[in-house]
Amino acid sequence: MASKKGEKEEREECEEEAEEEDWEDWVWWTNPLEELSDMVDAFEKQGLKGKTVLDVGTDCVKPLYLALKYEPQKIIGITLDKPPFAGNIAEDSRLLTETEIHFYTCDFLDDIKLAKIRNKVIGEDKFDIILISKTLHHLRTGKCIAGKRGSKHEPSKHKQHREDEKCCIYEFKEAEIFERFFKYGEKVIVYEYFDPNEKDNDKVRGKGGYFTMKEWRRILEHLSKNYKVELFKPIGCHLTKKELERAKEKLRQVDCICFCIEEK
Ligand SMILES: C[S@@+](CC[C@H](N)C(=O)[O-])C[C@H]1O[C@@H](n2cnc3c(N)ncnc32)[C@H](O)[C@@H]1O
């Protein structure tokens, strides 16, 4: 009898787990909808119709929604880990949209592979638009700065220091990374989440987690000095020196940012 009850409980537990897994699957489709709605102003302003788009760190779902709504000519998504349904989206979307969608496993920092993909799909031109959504903070390439953030983590002093993403907080080199974007694209749309409380709660991912307020202030100052920046979230404005102060204040009250950059 006891074992029968055990079996029943086990089955119910399995069913619950399966339901949770199903829900996790749906999140792949529902989260991008919510995030794209934060970026709509940027897409409307730039106009994607007939354009070529590179989606860096793609989730493979946003490209489908973008194709259906804005009809760009081609969307190329690159990521370090393609989800299992990427091939289906690329193939089956042909029934619903004229937009060509291609996905590749490729590191944005790998010039040789990225140039090969670009040449194959659009030739030697730049992409009209690069989209980087929730992925900019993954492009931390500098040294570990965990010590500077006040954590007891200075490589030389801390015995447990391991050179990996879970342990370190890497530096973000905005000048280098944005120069790289403009090697491949005419305009860049950036969308990011962050923690407005100066903490780092995404430290286990993205080579050190989301950008802090201090990093955002530094990044935005660099961008406003060197590029034309149009901010869409948290406020809509051209990022002049004056507006920069207003934007920095507003950033403290929100947890996402969306802006478009082009060369001056
Ligand atoms: C937080 S997810 C964001 C996914 C999606 N863009 C979104 O808006 O939800 C970060 C993605 O960036 C990818 N990624 C991280 N570093 C990358 C790199 N150097 N080049 C290309 N993709 C990268 C990861 O594989 C992951 O798929």
Image (cartoon, rainbow, N blue to C red):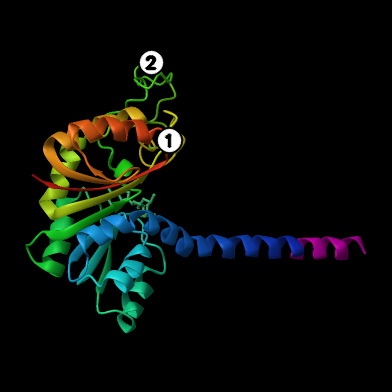
Badge 2 is on which residue?
157
Pointer 2 or 1: first along the chain: 2
Where residue 30 appears, x then y in whole percent? 48, 62
- Residues under labels 2 and 1: Cα distance? 36 Å
Q: Is residue 171 left or right of 201 when viewed as pictured?
A: left
Please give the range of residues in magenta. 1-11
State yes or no: discs 2 and 1 in contact (Cβ < 8 Å).
Answer: no
Residue 70 falls in image quadrant? bottom left
The residue shown at (76%, 64%) is: 12
Quadrant containing the N terminus is bottom right
Badge 1 is on which residue?
253
The residue shown at (69%, 61%) is: 16
In the displayed image of the protein, which residue is found farthest to the top?
157
Where residue 11 appears, x then y in whole percent? 75, 65
Dot 2 surroundings within 10 Å: few (below 14), some, or many (20 or more)? Answer: few
Instruction: Inspect the image, locate mark 2, and give the three-letter code of the amino acid beneath it.
Output: Lys
Residue 142 falls in image quadrant? top left
Viewer-proximal residue among 55 and 194 = 194
The residue shown at (83%, 60%) is: 6
Q: Is residue 31 left or right of 127 when viewed as pictured?
A: right
Give the dominant element type of the magenta stretch: helix, strand or loop. helix
Viewer-proximal residue among 106 and 127 = 127
Dot 1 surroundings within 10 Å: few (below 14), some, or many (20 or more)? Answer: few
Q: Closer to us: mark 2 or mark 1?
A: 1
Quadrant containing the C terminus is top left
Residue 64 falls in image quadrant? bottom left
Viewer-proximal residue among 223 and 130 = 223
